[in-house]
Amino acid sequence: MGFFDSFARRAWSVPIDLEYLRYCQPGSEFYEPSQTSALSPRLDQRVEFPSDWTVRRGSPWTMCSHPSVSLPRQGWKIHLSSTRGRSREVLRLAADYCFANKMPFKYLSTEAEFDGQNAKYADRGSAGKFVTVYPPTIDHFRTALESLEELLGNEEGPYILSDRRWGRAPIYYRYGAFVPPASGSKFATTLITPDGLEVEDVRRPTFIIPDWIDTPDFLHKNSGMADENDFPFRMVEALHFSNGGGVYVAEAITDEFVPAGTTVVLKEARPHAGIDLDGVDAVERLAHEAEVLNDLQDTGYAPRYFGTFQAWEHHYAVMEHIPGHDLKRTWMLRTPVLKPHPWELSQKGYLEWLSTTVSELDRAVSVFHDRGWLLGDIHPKNVIMRDGVHPVFIDFEFAHPMDDDWRSNQGAPGYEPAPGLGGAEADRWSLGMMELDLILPQATVADQSNHYKIEEILRHGETVFSVPRATTDAVRAKTVRVIGYESTPLPDPDSLSVQELMRAFADGVSANISFDHDGPVVPADIAVYGVDGDQARIGFPYGLVGVLAALNVSGQPLDDDLVSRSKAWIRERLGSIRSRGFAGREGIEFGLREAGITDLLPEVRSVEVDAPADHSYWSGWAGVGLHALSDADRTADDAEEAAEALKKLIEEAEAGADSAGLLYGWSGPALFWGQAYQRHERRSEFLDLAREAIKLDLARCSETSNNTMELDETWRTLPYLGVGSVAIALAIRELAKATGRTEFGRELDLIHRAATYNQYAQAGFATGVGGFLSYLNRYEDRTSRDRDVIDSHIGGIRLHALRKNGGLLTRGNQGLRLSCDFQTGTAGVVGALAALDGRWSGIPFLPGTGTVHVERR
């Protein structure tokens, strides 16, 4: 599969977190798992289970094993794919074979889980996998491949990108883990090397064999591989991937479609993959898109279309390559709100570009409607700005003939039409939301009937940025003037003082704490539904403890009933604590102290958890050490143990961590060593180690065109506290407090500027405004610039605020749903505002400046 493999490797690491979409349920304002799987028909209705087999029915997998067979730790495994229509029969045939040969296997349990595994934005590293067979030996592996090919040779199914195909049947194989890793592993699946080391079982959308494994000869003789020789283009760059296929920049090497040497865009479609909500696969959608493009060729607002072809099993459409960035990226490069202080918010060039772009976008959609097509999926990533100024719409997969009652099922969150709109009105609503997004990054919080935010953002644009009234009225005409909105809902964030704003957020969080169901007590990030979800539901970052701590330091009364129920709920789940640091036991201890619920501390401390395996604040020795320094009940030995472990880890570190920042980078250990010097022992070694840790995180950063220094992830830079560069500035300033002099001065200035952008897309602690507020507020030597920035950040939080149950809430990570947790949501905002009020440091484990300890009320 040569060129498919090579381009998968180049784009796999771009972290578009589509996992959050799985938790965005229609009608729900919070992240929640889908309930469709529980109600969906099972796929094993034709399977006859032998009485001596063990069957564990779960979600998404049902596991089948025979008690006489012991699985090895790892080996060659077999995956089967299928079409939905043939899934039950494929499962029956495969199950019968496995039962007869006592070969353990698992399969997707329900239709809904099958659909999810084959959806357009399913995880490409596991997409298509329907049945997994675990042959206990290499001989069983070969026999199973050959036997299953006889059974399934005429079946069809999507290609499994992480595997190699066996022959032409939908049978695939890879070398990987058979059983889960031991508790405490930082990887979801692991392999054991010949030296006995536990390493990640890498699962990416390309075939990977561990370098110590020899491929059996028989696999080379029967492998379904693509022939690159007949491919009429040379791949240049991968632009985008979904489970349905990729989008590539390519150069023609023949004259078949365009003159040789011409740069084009190829859009790929994989058969039976990328199934949408209407049950249509990528190939059928691509054929439909070609029809739409043909109709729109002469509009100037759609790319030129040159034809389609098939290579191997994949289908491709050949389109014009548009020079320019997508609309979102173009806006980011032009808007004054994504610039550090001092700001020039009424920029003539930006305002002219904004007005022209809104007018051109309106004209483009009108032209498409006049041609008889509704778009149905309008958002900034589906518009390329030719040379930065002329919009060209791309991705017409979901376009539909004009119909006043039709609306797409596939809209992008934040841009979906308001309830009750259809036809051209639905398109125009999405267009208006996309244009609103060109004014402020908070625009998408106005979905889910928060339509009053549209007017708030438009007025902010008019008064602060001098956006022309004609431009804002063009947005109003497509949105709030179509359906109206509640003009004066309360509380109004703009009318509240900082203390009142903090209390309104605390009221919003308190109103959403509930013990009356089996799910999380507090609406939170999707982490509470993940592998370590039970711990996450308790812990400081995402769980109840962090919320209680934030409420208490803000002065929000924790009534006796809430405390009593919280203690009982936590006590029942202490066995779920499986890690250390901020995410685990230390974070829970710290949170209970801050909440004033100290009688639970002995029970939490008694929970046995393995020693950390890494350096991090999140789950490693930095979190353990900083907590030891913050807790008067801890002995010097606890801090010393962390110091020794971290010293060993940094001596073994050949490079920086996988990330930089407070949570996962070396900034956490640097903070620990700076604090240890001040609060544990004035040992010069601590200062040297802090310097080395700071250098490791700085090595992950680069200077930006905005004259800032930020974490460089190649495709983007990040300034944030949790994941980003600002925690490095925090560590540098802690080092300065310890030594009495500033080191890394130039880097500090550049990073400090990164905390002064006018607006940020999220409000929370780790990757939003809350983290910057806590950083800026931490030091007493604030300048007038810092005070201006703090005031601006408070205004940004007001723009993020949404009214709910008589209080205020903010959206969580990705900005798609509300969250009450500390790490990503409203409790983190409460904590940041409480830090401004001098009630605590705003950063767990760190002492404040003039901290006021608040006992539980």
Image: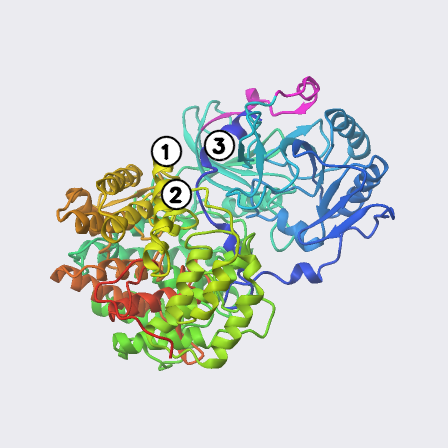
Q: Nearer the viewer, residue 714 or 543?
A: 543
Which residue does the image show at 51% across and 38% down from the upper left? 246
Give the magenta-colored segment's residue range. 214-235
Residue 725 shows in the view: no
Q: Nearer the viewer, residue 17 or 399?
A: 17
The disc at residue 615 is: 2
Q: Which residue is mark 1?
A: 653
Amino acid on which the number 1 mark rests in the picture: Ala
Q: Secondary structure at mark 1?
A: loop
Q: Position of residue 847 (x, y in %)?
A: 27, 60
Q: Position of residue 26 (x, y in %)?
A: 56, 66
77 w.r.t. 345: above or below: above
Quadrant showing the C terminus: bottom left
Which residue does the image show at 69% across and 18% down from the upper left? 221
Quadrant showing the N terminus: top right
570 w.r.t. 626: above or below: below
- Sequence order check, earlier mark of 1 and 3: 3
Which image quadrant is residue 643 in? top left
Q: Nearer the viewer, residue 130 or 558?
A: 558
The Cα–Cα distance between marks 3 and 2, rounded to whole angstroms, is 28 Å
Asked if disc 2 and disc 1 are in contact, CB closer than 8 Å, the reply is yes
Q: Which residue is mark 3?
A: 9
Q: Position of residue 167 (x, y in %)?
A: 71, 26
Q: Position of residue 99 (x, y in %)?
A: 83, 40
Nearest-to-viewer mark from 3 and 2: 2
Which residue does the image show at 48% across and 69% down from the upper left? 418
Count neighbours of disc 2 (C-alpha within 10 A) and say few if under 14, some if 14 to 19, many if 20 or more.
Answer: many
- Sequence order check, earlier mark of 3 and 2: 3
Q: Secondary structure at mark 3?
A: helix
